[in-house]
Amino acid sequence: MYKIENEELLVEFELLGAQMRRLKSKVKDKDYLWHGDAKYWKRSAPVLFPIVGRLKNDEYQFEGKKYSLSQHGFARDKDFELRENKEKRILFRLIHSQATLEVYPFKFELYIEYRLKKNRLEIEYRVKNIDDRDIYFSIGAHPAFYWPLDKNLSKEDYILEFEQPENLKRHLLNEKGLLTAESEDFLKDSRKIELNEELFKADALVFKDPKSQSITLKSSLSNDELKLNFESFPYLGIWSKAEGAPFICIEPWYGIADSADSEGDLKNKEGIIRLKSEAEFYCQHSIEIK
């Protein structure tokens, strides 16, 4: 494990997936990040790259050739290189390899940087195209937080509250994790999602283009809150398992699962990012303990 810390927060990481494994408030002497029990879900906060969600038949096409990729891509299962580890900042890198080229035919560098500023952890993703042609990718975050935050409260005591009132549809997934053509009205001029396990019986909540730049996990019975800022991410997923799992994932995405009727061409995939040779893509989200 590697760590960064300041007066308020302690954060630990592993090289596998450059994954955050602990987020602790030193002020409250309390952990907020799900510890990754395989009984429910073994991960804590994986990065999703070079796809977000599931591909139809776990495959895609690029320039006439078929490739296979499992859900959320390979980055979460690759050992990253530690590039820098200072007291309040840590930087990891993943570069293409022969193994990645067999399933994803592009040369890239992926950097993940974590920075501490008071009670906030900033997380920056940077993708660099080192190929001699355009590359296509998606990227997203999948952090899981304890739910409930206060063990003396119930899950139903909690809400997720958007920064501003939203009019959002829930885009429905089928049993294979693919987007269907169906959606349902979910929020109408409202900021609040009343939380309960029933919400996740049909998989994740998937939203497109929320107006808000942040969402907060909170309860009226506690002053303990966690806020996730997701500056300009076009998609947002919220997920837990409906079988008593004590965590909830708040997932800002640049990308989304295939639709059930997808033709599989990577260039035409919804949410795909096209990056020119030698160009770089940046995005950032942050987590605040309030």
Image: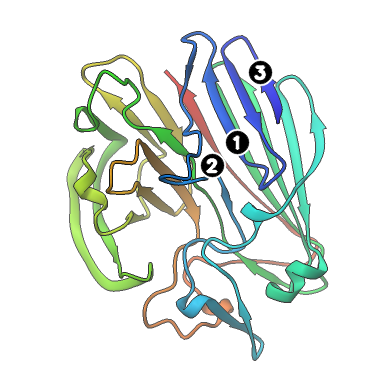
Residue, x 33% and y 54% (percent of image)? 204
The reply to whether callout 2 and callout 3 are in contact (CB within 8 Å) is: no
Q: Badge 1: how crowded within 10 Å, few (<14), some, or many (20+)?
A: many
Q: Is residue 165 above or below residue 202?
A: above
Q: Which disc is residue 5 wearing?
A: 3
Residue, x 72% and y 72% (percent of image)? 134
Q: State the SS at label 2.
A: loop
Give the alpha-carbon distance from disc 1 to disc 3, as whole Å.
Answer: 13 Å
Q: Badge 3: how crowded within 10 Å, few (<14), some, or many (20+)?
A: many
Q: State the SS at label 1.
A: strand
Q: Badge 2: how crowded within 10 Å, few (<14), some, or many (20+)?
A: many
Q: State the SS at label 3.
A: strand
Q: Quadrant of the C terminus?
A: top left
Residue, x 44% and y 34% (percent of image)? 228
Towards the viewer: 11 or 111: 11
Query: Upstream in the sequence, badge 2 or badge 1?
Result: 1
Towards the viewer: 131 or 71: 71
Q: Amino acid at mark 1?
A: Met
Give the alpha-carbon distance from disc 2 to disc 1, as whole Å.
Answer: 6 Å
Q: Which residue is mark 1?
A: 20
Q: How is the image coloured?
A: rainbow
**Residue 258 horizontal/vertical position (percent):** 44, 72
**Residue 179 horizontal/vertical position (percent):** 35, 70
Q: Amino acid at mark 3?
A: Glu
Query: Upstream in the sequence, badge 1 or badge 3?
Result: 3
Q: Which residue is mark 2?
A: 45
| Relative horizontal placement of residue 263, taking residue 106 as reference (left or right) | left
Q: How many marks?
A: 3
The reply to whether callout 2 and callout 1 are in contact (CB within 8 Å) is: yes
| Relative horizontal placement of residue 85, taking residue 148 as reference (left or right) | right
Q: Image quadrant of residue 65? A: bottom right
